[in-house]
Amino acid sequence: MANITKKVSWSSRADDSNATGEGTPLLNGSEGYPRQLSGGSIFQVGRLRTVDMDEGMTSDEDSLRGRPKEIRHSEKLLSLKYESLDYDNSENQLFLEEERRMSYMGFRCLEISRWVVCGLIGLLTGLIACFIDILVEQLAGLKYRVVKENIEKFTTVGGLSISLILWAVLNSAFVMVGAILVAYIEPIAGGSGIPQIKCYLNGVKIPRVVRLKTLLVKVAGVICSVAGGLAVGKEGPMIHSGAVVAAGVSQGRSTSLKRDFKIFEYFRRDTEKRDFVSAGAAAGVSAAFGAPVGGVLFSLEEAASYWNQMLTWRIFFASMISTFTLNFFLSVYHDNPGDLSNPGLINFGRFESNSLEYCLYEIPLFIAMGAIGGLLGALFNVLNYWLTIFRIRYIHKPCLQVMEAMLVAAVTATVSFTMIYFCNDCQPLGPDKAEEYPLQLFCADGEYNSMATTFFNTPERGVRSLFHNPPGSYNPLTLGMFTLTYFFLACWTYGLAVSAGVFIPSLLIGAAWGRLIGILLPSITSSSSVNIWADPGKYALIGAAAQLGGIVRMTLSLTVIMIEATGNVTYGLPIMLVLMTAKLVGDYFEEGLYDIHIKLQSVPFVHSEPPATSHWLTAREVMSSPVTSFSRIEKVGTIVDLLSNTSTNHNGFPVVVNHAAGDEPAKLCGLILRSQLIVLLKHKVFMELARSKLTRRKLQLKDFRDAYPRFPPIQSIHVSQDERECMMDLTEFMNPTPYTVPQETSLPRVYKLFRALGLRHLAVVDDSNRVVGLVTRKDLARYHLGKHGLEELQLAQT
Amino acid sequence: MLAAFPEDLEISEYCRSLLSIFKDQYVAYAGCLVSAARPVKVCLGCNQGYARLSEIYANISNDQTSNSSCRDSLLRSDRLMLVYRLYGNLQSIWTQAACDRCLGAEPHVLTNDTQYFMDELNQTLSCFEYQQGNQSVLCQQCKSMYESLNVLYGGMEKNRSLCIDMEDAMNVTRRLWSTTFTCISLREETVPVIAVSCFMLFLPIVFYLSSYLHSEQRKLKLIHPKRAKSNNSLMHIQDKFS
């Protein structure tokens, strides 16, 4: 079992694979060692299976700790590389002083500058969205024109296989650029970015996730991957981009460019930054879908625990600004400046009112479609889960990742071409020229290949034509084949080392099978009711919602996004019902796609609810112990040694009154962070020096902010032998009132405290306020409810 | 008798005569439209009728000379507004047919482009007729003509200088070419396309197999967190459950 078992298996013998019982086949795979328990016995306590061990084994355990145990990657791990954000404010004396110095006007100005920052976030996010949109349109247009000319040329003279190769090569070339950017320069920019932002808003510091470099790679990468014809969308990356913009703008400087504008200095801490990042994510959603309210709700859904009304209002402001910046610049681009009524990167187009009618008796049908969406979504997620595990284990070299992405691009082109080639579904060209790149191929003159409207097009336009093309534009066979192939293509594509989202492909799959249902309905039912099922477009919409809901399992925000993107409230109820059903059905089989990816990244994610059946666990079992702590007045040498000890990469240290000998607990009087200690060491705030140089400037909160967010590693700070003997007084800098809980507190209580306050460290004290342990995010996140009851994740270095 | 009485009072003799002319023109134009319905010759065949109808309608609607104007009495004195509506229908047919695009500034003269297109079209059609007996010969002989016609049509489509007559004539020609004479290219290269596709589809399989077999699996180091003495905690748990 991957539970408390790890206490066990460090027996004197080296068969340390004991740690993996039958419940965790992933950990050791096929190598089935006999379960040997040296002097241990299995208890089944509650629903958490634990294995006891002898007291005498501790020495062995310690000696074995140095020896790293290697395992394969699986979802049941927590990675050490993820740290927590400091959402909780450290109310030390410096902070109090600063607050005292600040005038009433100062606070007013802060409030105003928060609004200014939000406006800037919206503006820049909208601009980025506009940039991406225009560039994708231009590049994809160029590609499709070249391929189309080529196909037209070769249709008559022969040599269509050359067109196929041309298409595949063009696709691969675009994708290669994108994949190289992602794989070699900034791997965190891969994927949709929503899981990463979700983690960030949850309070996990994902390394490099909000850097300028990430933004650049993300934007360039998504342009390449969409133009490269992959089954991807540009909406997820927009959300990530918005978040990066927010994190950058709110700091008033760029650490990457080494430029400091000396503004917004007050916002240089995790608490403020995270609020702005949620505004940025909202602005991103709103630019991507033209859904300002949906954006706000997205941020709310992902970061609901730290929220207040003013923040909501500011986030809404950022969202609105972002949508309308995008609208304005797109209107300039489309040569009717000033027209603000054409929102969103993805424009689902307006449904005409008469094609929208639905009746009460259609509701069960919609719910059934929701169930189908849930099933297909779960299938999608399961397949993608196995694929991602394979990718993490075997395809981790950048060159392999680039090759894989190129292969997917080439195969996507090939499959699309073959489908178009063998498609017999010809439709007359409409008078309104809805098809941008109509391919005739073997159709009669004046007709186009209907498979090409979905395959020979950017996915977004595909969605739009599935929603709005008049009845009879597609054969059932065409739609069926398209759904099938695109489902597997999209599933294969998500998780490649390219920056690309899964929203649009999901919508496209759903729209295809939804429209298929819409077409097949009249043929099933009696001919008298033909009129009722007249427009398959609405079924395409419902199918799209069902499929998307089945894959990403978002609820409130997705409903509102769909309503806003299609621009009508009439469908609010069906879309909500469909998303509910899809989530219900899907959750029965598998988690949402984003949650799967968060798990596979081994992120210590604190969910909104503690795992059920965990009330019997107390803080005593959860906490890390013994605690590495400092005395109020501590020797510099001790601090440096502890900080540079790589095996104990702690970030928060309880400060105790008097450090007792050994591991005996001592009275808690504060908490100090690694980052604070590093700043103190860097400025050499030693008591001896303070005595000798009286004129020395007093350290201010500003010094801590200047070092934020990239505190130098301890190795870069030089401390001489003499200085090691100095003493440091931590009283002024530590947080004097850290949150504490008694040892008997149950896990759910601890969990709620953590989640609601955004804590990073929680000290566990005994009845006389002596610190006996420390609970961190990783201690809490390791419990989760598995198939065999409560399970425990293992920590690993990745 | 009773019915005739108010009419005489309301409508002047002049208006009555206008209405009568309108009737004649209307009937003539509507008849022309019906006979030009298939194949569509609405713009080229009935443009004079439309011009005359518009003229008389303009006369009616501009008439404000007398103190009881015909415009008011004929067009808008009842809720049915029959004259207005009848004319409106025909006018909307005319607009939808986009006839103004192929007619010049003077209403009943074709534009030069239209004339040229019609000539080309007739040449192509006569070629079809001439070669009708032998399809393969037809496809070869008329190909250049048909293609240049297609190019011309495509160009005019971009300029938006097509009216319904030309569109319909082109549709018919295309249908003749594609369906009746089946001169379109056939799916002949199935084998090379399938071969290339299979090769492409084969590549990922090779890639995944080779990376499965050759790539070194990434291993992770497990870390063992510090915990409270297990003995202690387990005793604790057991106490609770015993």
Image: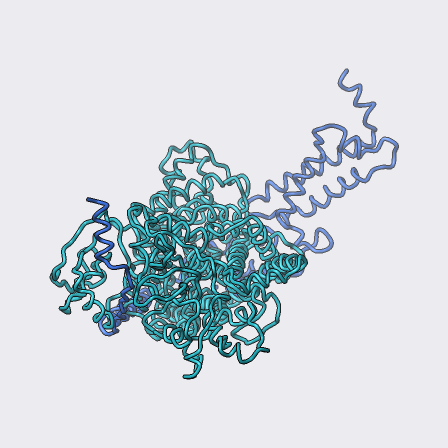
Chain colours: A cyan, B blue
Badge count? 0
Residue A523 shows up from this direction: yes
* Front-most of residues A272 and A381: A272
Q: Position of residue A191 (x, y in %)?
A: 41, 63
Name the residue nearer the viewer: A482 or B138: A482
Q: From the top left corner, tell me how far across and down residue A202 is, in percent.
A: 43, 56
Residue located farthest toward the top when viewing the structure as drawn: B2
Q: Residue at x 12, y 60 (%)?
A: A39
Left-right relation of A636 to A387: right
Question: Where in the figure is residue B155, as x and y percent of width and height?
Answer: 58, 63
- Looking at the image, residue A552 lies above or below residue A669: above
The residue at 36%/58% (across/down) is: A770
Q: Looking at the image, which residue is at 65% across and 50% down?
A: B99
Question: Where does the C terminus of chain B fall, quadrant-wise?
Answer: top left
Most extreme residue toward the bottom is A721
Query: Does residue B168 appear in the picture of this structure?
Result: no
Q: Is A310 placed left or right of A376 in the picture? A: right
Identify the image quadrant of the N terminus of chain B.
top right
Q: Quadrant of residue A717?
A: bottom left
Name the one closer to the observer, A136 or A652.
Answer: A652
Residue at image position (79%, 37%) is: B60
Left or right for A299, reference A412 = right
Task: Residue A533: name its quadrant.
Answer: top left
Q: Which one is in front, B200 or A261? A: A261
Residue A251 against residue B79 in the figure, above or below: below
Q: Residue B134's x, y, as percent? A: 40, 60
